[in-house]
Image (cartoon, rainbow, N blue to C red):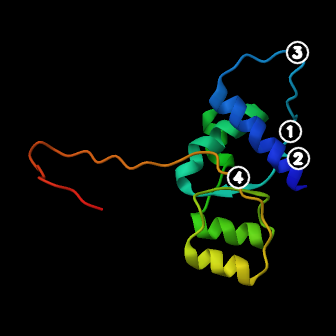
Amino acid sequence: MKKWFTVFLCIALLVVLGGCAKSKDQFEPTFTMDTYPIIDGSTANLPLAHALAQHFLGMTQEESESFVRFNKTDEAYWNLLYGYCDLVLAYEASSGMKRTLHDQKAEFDYYEIGLDALVFILSAQNPIESLSQ
């Protein structure tokens, strides 16, 4: 089961982010509403989840917005732990959640799919002279 979700995630990322033309020999899984994995995650990953639903289920943007329901990061990890979802698209678990998952002896496969950056934008009317960590 873990391997299937790994394959799903890799293919999804290639399709959504790659923008490559599909050859006739390229494998792409077929999903229905019944076979599509239940995905939860952090709300910052909603655009990715919408794109996946649109691509794999042939949904419109409006349909995917009704279909995809994400919680916040820690709640998504809880839902994965208790079997309410099959896959989580989220940021790294908080230290408290990591302790909980360790205490519960949860065994998940983690795959980094991107890095995050912060960009600070300031108004000319609100200048600053320095910024530190």
Vertical comparison of 79 with 99: above or below: above
Distance, label 1 to label 3, CA atoms, is 18 Å
Lower position in the chain sequence, tag 3 or tag 4: 3
- Image coordinates for residue 114, horizontal then vertical, percent: 58, 45
Q: Residue at x 78, y 74 (%)?
A: 106
Residue behind mark 3:
24
Q: Are dots 3 and 4 in contact, CB under 8 Å? A: no
Q: Are marks 1 and 2 in contact (CB under 8 Å)?
A: yes
Q: Which secondary structure, mark 1?
A: loop
Which amino acid, mark 1?
A: Phe
Q: Amino acid at mark 2?
A: Thr
Report how far apart the C-alphas of labels 1 and 2 lie in the structure: 6 Å
The dot on residue 73 is none
Q: Mark 2 highlights which residue? A: 35
Residue at image mark 4: 111
The residue at the point 90 percent across, 18 percent down is 25
